[in-house]
Image (cartoon, rainbow, N blue to C red):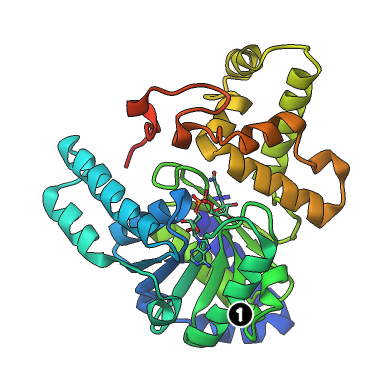
Amino acid sequence: MWPHDAVAELKRIAKEKPAAAGAVEEMRELPIDEMTRVTVVGSGQMGSQIGMLCALSGYDTVLVDIDPAALRRTQRELAARMNQWVAKKKLTATEKDAAMARLSVSSSLESAVGETDLVIESVVEKLALKREIFAQLDHWAPPHAILATNSSTIVSSQLASNTARPDKVLNLHFFFPPLTVECVEVVVNANTSEATAHAALEFCHRIGRVGVLIRNEIPGFVANRILGAMEREAMALYEAGIADFHDIDLICRQAFHHPMGPFEIMDLSGNDVTYLAMQQMYEDTGDRDWKPCGSLVEKVKEGQLGRKTGIGWYTYPREDKNDQRSFKK
Ligand SMILES: NC(=O)c1ccc[n+]([C@@H]2O[C@H](COP(=O)([O-])OP(=O)(O)OC[C@H]3O[C@@H](n4cnc5c(N)ncnc54)[C@H](O)[C@@H]3O)[C@@H](O)[C@H]2O)c1
């Protein structure tokens, strides 16, 4: 569903349902045009690019991380990436300078969110940590601020219950690399207001992304349930000795016209990220099918995390470490 369709649907529901009269009022009250300040918590491979995307789209953006080295790396890598875009004429030097000027970094969550309108949390996939961060965000961010999580698997009701503003909490699930992939899953929970859903969809539209509204919460949402099922089956076939991982990837590319096979995708996302997502799914659902496969556990134990470490399922020449091939504006 395209964002404007989803927005139209929300407006229609708000008009049709008498109980939604309040929601119409809320929608009017929500100053979407005045939403100018975004905070992204966690400046890893996802958060850094989400922050850059927001800054490129005109939002004053702060990237927060507890690790000062991660912030320094982020600034260096984003500046290099934007210079490449200028060289490739995807961006003018003036546009790049303006976007970089709108992007700042901070290691203090408290000061970063004091005047924010929207927070996108993108720290590591651990429920206890995200719950703690949502409690802090609720304490320090202004009451009007929307609190979103970029979790791969965790439904927002598990975080909303740690805040006093459950109506302003939802999932905004981006895909790697967020500067390139245009889809965002906008997943609401039972307490998310129509106004918040509307604002989130409009925000996606304004950053040039297709927000797809999902009204029913389920761990892993839609995309990662489908992707996870494919990755699990691929690893099961590999572990059973049915086919080598190269050939499984080749079959998926050739037979389904997938741009990458499941093992290539795991290397791109990070084997640690896939491991944590599957472990979280296992804990959330109790379904043993989600328990991370032995070969994935081994990769993580050996530090073979994929492109970011130069070795995962495949080996990458040093200069390819951050090559995301389809990286485009
Ligand atoms: N990698 C993917 O393909 C992908 C895709 C969609 C969503 N996600 C989700 O995005 C989130 C981040 O994933 P990633 O791949 O960017 O991970 P990452 O490991 O690259 O980055 C996580 C960052 O969070 C920081 N962090 C940890 N604790 C923190 C705290 N208390 N306060 C502030 N920063 C803190 C770390 O220092 C690190 O820089 C996860 O929830 C993940 O499931 C990942």
Q: Is residue 97 above or below residue 189?
A: above
Q: Position of residue 52 (x, y in %)?
A: 34, 55
Q: Residue at x 55, y 26 (%)?
A: 264
Relative depth, front residue between 271 and 323: 271
Q: In this rendered view, identify the residue nearer to me: 223 or 29.
A: 223
Q: Is residue 57 left or right of residue 118?
A: left
The image position of residue 75, as x and y in percent, is 29, 55
Please state which amino acid type lies under the numbered disc 1.
Ala
Q: Which residue is under mark 1?
A: 135
The answer to which quarter of the image holds residue 329 is top left
The residue under the point 31% across, 56% down is 72
Q: Is residue 100 left or right of residue 171?
A: left
Residue 26: x percent and y percent? Answer: 56, 84
Above or below, comparing residue 124 to residue 234 in the picture = below
In this view of the protein, can residue 11 be seen by the observer?
Answer: no
Which corner quadrant of the image does residue 47 belong to?
A: bottom left
User: Is the residue marked by circle 1 packed among few (<14), some (14-19), or many (20+) residues within 10 Å?
Assistant: some
Residue at image position (62%, 83%) is 165
Q: Position of residue 89 (x, y in %)?
A: 17, 38
Which residue shows up at 49% across the image and 85% down it?
140
Question: Element at badge 1?
Answer: helix
* 218 sits to left or right of 213: right
